[in-house]
Amino acid sequence: MQIKVDRDLKVPVYLQIRNQIASMILDGTLRAGQPLPPERTLAQSLGINRSTVVNAYSELKADGLVDSRVGKGTVVLSHLTGEQDKEKYSDPPAWSQFLSHTAERSNESLLRDILELANRRDIISFAAGISGMETDPVEALRGIEEEIVSPACRFALNHTPAEGMPCLRESISELMCARGVEAGPEEILVLSGSQQGIDIAARAFLDPGDVVFVEEPTFFSALQIFRAAGARIIGIPVDARGMRVDLLEQALTRYRPKFIFTVPTFQNPSGTTMDLERRKRLLELAYRRNTFILEDDPYSDLRFEGSRVPLLKELDKNGYVIYLSSFSKLLFPGVRIGWINAPKPMVVQFTKVKQMTDLHADSLSQWIIHRYLRSGGLDAHLSRIIAEYRIKRDIMIDELITDPVREMEWNKPQGGFYLWCRLPDDIPYATLMVKAAERGVAYVSGTAFFQGGKGGNYMRLNFTYPSREEIREGIRRLKAAIRETLQAGERNRTQRERKFGEFEVLR
Amino acid sequence: MQIKVDRDLKVPVYLQIRNQIASMILDGTLRAGQPLPPERTLAQSLGINRSTVVNAYSELKADGLVDSRVGKGTVVLSHLTGEQDKEKYSDPPAWSQFLSHTAERSNESLLRDILELANRRDIISFAAGISGMETDPVEALRGIEEEIVSPACRFALNHTPAEGMPCLRESISELMCARGVEAGPEEILVLSGSQQGIDIAARAFLDPGDVVFVEEPTFFSALQIFRAAGARIIGIPVDARGMRVDLLEQALTRYRPKFIFTVPTFQNPSGTTMDLERRKRLLELAYRRNTFILEDDPYSDLRFEGSRVPLLKELDKNGYVIYLSSFSKLLFPGVRIGWINAPKPMVVQFTKVKQMTDLHADSLSQWIIHRYLRSGGLDAHLSRIIAEYRIKRDIMIDELITDPVREMEWNKPQGGFYLWCRLPDDIPYATLMVKAAERGVAYVSGTAFFQGGKGGNYMRLNFTYPSREEIREGIRRLKAAIRETLQAGERNRTQRERKFGEFEVLR
């Protein structure tokens, strides 16, 4: 009997022994009636304590695999017909043959790569869409422990209705009111992050071949999700005033989309805000063409300057807007709570899909968000992070302006998380990403936000996550990487110009 | 200008005023240049403080909707072309026309109803699949607050990789080893509850029309999820030794399933455990027919008596088993953490689907589970709840045996959460559910666990969630409801017998 013990493994030695012997019994290497070595003998041969072997054997006894017989020691019990072992060895399944169309269409790893990059300590990351953690209101968690261990708050650890904890739905309903929308708690569905809302909408509305309109560029997860659903995705270009509704109108003469997905305020990735006139026009088009609007709004509370523009949901008087938002851009990003605000029949429908997916959002996180909203701390927190993010945005722009890369342009968003930068059309974007990574700086290439390989001459820079000093250093590294790439390009330039579609210079 | 103030609303009065005026400006009722009433006048007419109106007006100013002009007071700013208002009123969308096939196939509300029933205080619920909360190890949360507010543990509030927090994946890998499976951390994907694993598997593997085998009866959420995916679901009957592998073999001559879904240990709902011989035969069939097995294992740690039977994952030497489990049946049910253990290529594939759905499982909950596993408290906790659940099971059976309903049969599961009961074939199950609810007791009708309306003469009784006293009282109520239903049935009995398929009496 061959047994190996590895003390470097985290698995306790007695379990290593148990598992190896169990495996030999179950695959027929050890036959019924066969005795195991005496505990002392095995312990000596392995150089371990006898008690360790005793523990392993008693686990095997509890498993019903062996038994102690007087005079015979520990023997293997009968389990198997034995003759079936001939099919024991088989090739592993060819997994790729089993995959669904959905799985095949979702083979993109961009987002995972971004999250991984953001966690690497040696890289300054402008890639993440994450709030600055140093401003997280951890003080808001004070007292939470006393509460959750007390019987009165035990519901914070129990199941909650699929729609969300009733008290949190009320708090969110009040928050919606502060954003100008009268939404009752029954029109709120609590989500495990607002991205889940895009996924739920895709599952509830999209069949393969359905058309969906998005902004171009748009949030890459939305592209991924709609693509996985098998939808035909039509991009409507964005300029400094938001989605080009004139082009939307044209597109509506050719297509009948299930819905229009938009991030109208401090758009991801372009940072632009759709102005009021376009918002009204967008709604009119939706009413007239009987399509609806999925408004994703994670950033509108983060306005640094300029006048607030009403939400589409606020302007919509006919119930054509389904509204998504999230706390994870404002508070702790790992506390995954977002919400949908929709007409009640759709909340009922979404709840069914949500329930299939994960039953309900994490209860403790719902409780944390609820008590924070009730504490009234959110407004002061928002003022703090708005002040900080504005400074960070300005530092980023300052650093871009100082000894600028002549060929680089960027916008100045009035809020949100991102600066959107444009480089010469023919810049080799893969080379640039590698050179940037070599210098220890990461960003998201524009290609992630367009379809069909377009957008390589854009980059999205997040200014909320890195510290002020990291922003300065990171932009210096980035400019050096861009210069190096452009100079290398000069040398090998082919004269062929590449076109990247209708997206316009923002400023 | 008509403004209404309702002090009973939770919305602050100044926001009520702001929202109503904003709405009138945005829909054109108030035109550009028009003055708002002086603050003092409006305050008097509404019977509120002047400062409340001041607050409302300054919100409107911040929104860019009004401005103060010397000598004119507060006036509406120009925003709109105005003429577009003609399309302001439109019917709301006919939402049902927008739904996807997936949404249409997921129109079941059973699970939500169960969760709601379980939360009603006047009902004794045998319906929920929830652990007994009085045994939750809340003491394990001691110290968590200090940790999460300390900079060293701030990652517990930040994003985690989509695969899960690395330290938790390691802890789960060790837990798998204690369950007899050598699974490296890279073979673990952390889930937001194990139901998400069924959903992810369905999305990764099932196209409409694909065949999937399940036990009959089986976990109702699995039925819902596979149905929503558009799969053809074939049920393989269960008896006291688990899935009838002889019938499985027959079915495999007719169908080529993508996979076989099974809850082999303390099955939901029947409480039965597949014996070792059938497990080995099931694996052989999977190898030979090149189909794989989705093993859902939330209950196997909860064995009250008898010998442990090895997991399918433990017996499988060729990588044909994808294994699902969860902490939410063992610890706090609202802390939604489960996991998949699968071959590494499939973990990569599942991660992509998982990431689209909700980015990653809640970070704080991952941290709570990880530190609990590291504390070593799980074994002692399991001993405690096993002892308690065993007593509860015995109380339930005792109470059923005392003055029994002659026509009722039940099994005695060796572990898990559920007793599975059989009543006469022709019992009107809808009537019975109503009569039980009237008497203040709830259970899940067998129809939830079968397809095609079968199973009405079965009921699933959970014994872990209610208290001991509630079990006694609840079973008394249930027996009374059954007796009443049977007697009413005697009176109106039609002689036609109804057949409920191949499911066999358990004992």
Image (cartoon, coloured by chain):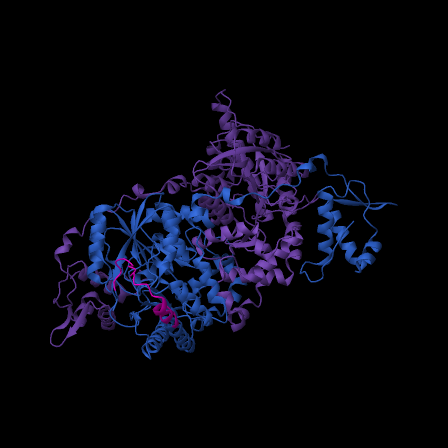
Chain colours: A purple, B blue
Horizontal placement of B310 versus B299: left or right?
left
Q: In which image quadrant can residue B386 be found? A: bottom left
Residue A201: image location, x then y, percent: 50, 46
Q: Which residues are magenta?
A: B484-504
Query: Does the stretch in magenta take in B138?
Result: no
Please identify the residue farthest to the right as the structure is shown: B71
Identify the residue at image location x=46%, y=33%.
A431
In the image shown, does B46 or A153 lie closer to the viewer?
Answer: B46
Q: Left or right: where does residue A49 sit relative to residue A36? A: right
Residue A402 visible somewhere in the drawing: no
Pinpoint residue A24: horizontal percent, then vertical percent.
Answer: 18, 60
Task: Compare residues A440 and B360 and report the one nearer the observer.
Answer: B360
- Left or right: where A198 falls relative to A297: left
Q: Is residue A241 above or below residue B245?
A: above
Inspect this view and state whether residue B131 appears: yes
Q: Residue at x 65, y 52 (%)?
A: A182
Is B275 or A352 nearer to us in this picture? A352
> Would you identify the image quadrant in which residue A217 lies?
top right
B172 up-or-down from A95: above or below = below
Relative image position of residue B493 (x, y in whole percent): 33, 66
Where, quadrant-wise, is the N terminus of chain A in this rendering? Answer: bottom left
